[in-house]
Amino acid sequence: MRDELILRRCFQLARLGAGNVSPNPMVGAVLVHEGKIIGEGWHQRWGEAHAEVNCLRAVSPENQALIPYSTLYCNLEPCFHFGKTPPCTDLILDHKIPSVVVSNTDPNPLVAGKGLAKLKSAGVKVSHGILEEDGLWLNRAFFTWISGQRPRVILKWAQTSDGFLGKKNERTAISSPAALRLVHRWRAECDAILVGTNTALLDDPRLDVRHYFGKNPLRIMLDSKGKIPSSHHLLDDSTETWVYGSISSTVQYSKTKFLQTTGKLLITSLLEDLKKANHAILLVEGGADVLNQFMETGYWDEIRVLENELHLAEGLRSPQIPAHAVLKEQFSVGADTVRIFTR
Ligand SMILES: [Zn+2]
């Protein structure tokens, strides 16, 4: 029971890295001596120190002598390979930490159990598999990235209680301020956001993070016919933007890239482009045609639906959740209900 509690603390710490570590996993580490936490840390930014390093750095000078008598908890297996930083297994052995508890083994073939095996063979007591499911859910984007070799695709839409996205050919704001804040948090936690031509044209969205903390993700817009006027927010060149389509204006862009495509977007090439650019989490915000295309081709991992209490009676029908989708989470945000589905 105590192991679970401390690992949950690791998950909390790990989540603090959300939006800043992708495509790396979110990792938290806690060092415990005789039931007392003497160090905590998390992986804060891609390319920077791992959770274990930050955890050990956080141990106060007077507690340093306790490290060789403590247990290190970590939601993910300590790394074994030289990446951007030296392996954490060496760090653990150098500090003579006698016991390590983890939730998940690393799916990365470079690590995959080798980190734990190395610790074991050096005499470290190793436990793993505690809260494994929760750990998989926490780092689902990372697990898709490694095992699926592609970005995780999250489909998101907001609908009325009678199943409409909005009125036809009219911008309809249907989410509460609290739900809007949640959506902006989701944006901050992903690497890229995609919208189709109609949504870009009708809603003129900014696709940035204004109602929450965090970085702006890459914006992606489909515009095969060059319909979007350069006065629209998505062509304001304020942040990195990809446009799948041709350019209709003579404006000079620096942060906006035009990727030629004729006709329908080829999802496989989009995912390949994202992968090459190291973007591991894609949030698809609409509209219905684009969302349906992802569902029909099977390229989706997660669906997030916000439902409010409005009644429209007519308008643009929301997409159908696939029959094999599994409801994973349901919660309220203000007056809206949020449901998260997986496969
Ligand atoms: Zn490491």
Image: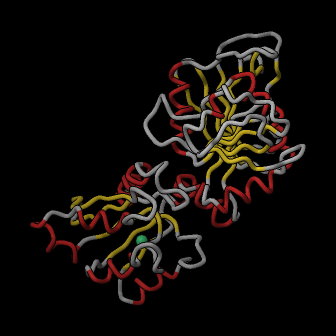
32 over 337 or under it: above or below: below
**Residue 340 on image: x %, y %:** 64, 38
Q: Quadrant of ligand 1?
A: bottom left
Q: Residue at x 68, y 48 (%)?
A: 257
29 over 258 or under it: above or below: below
Q: Residue at x 51, y 60 (%)?
A: 25
Q: Going by the picture, which residue comes out furthest to the right?
A: 263
Q: Is residue 216 left or right of residue 232?
A: left
Q: Is residue 160 left or right of residue 338?
A: right
Q: Quadrant of residue 63?
A: bottom left
164 over 151 or under it: above or below: above
Q: Quadrant of residue 65?
A: bottom left
Count how many numbered circles sit on residues in the image: 0
45 over 337 or under it: above or below: below
Q: Choose between 200 and 136: the one closer to the eye.
A: 200
Q: Going by the picture, which residue comes out furthest to the left?
A: 62
Q: Residue at x 22, y 77 (%)?
A: 68
**Residue 139 on image: x %, y %:** 54, 56
**Residue 238 on image: x %, y %:** 55, 37
Residue 327 appears in the rendering: no
Q: Residue at x 67, y 66 (%)?
A: 147
Residue 139 appears in the rendering: yes
Q: Choose between 131 and 288: the one closer to the eye.
A: 288
Render colour scheme: secondary structure
Q: Going by the picture, which residue comes out furthest to the bottom?
A: 121
Q: Choose between 93 and 134: the one closer to the eye.
A: 93
Instruction: Point out the image quarter for the N terminus.
Output: bottom left
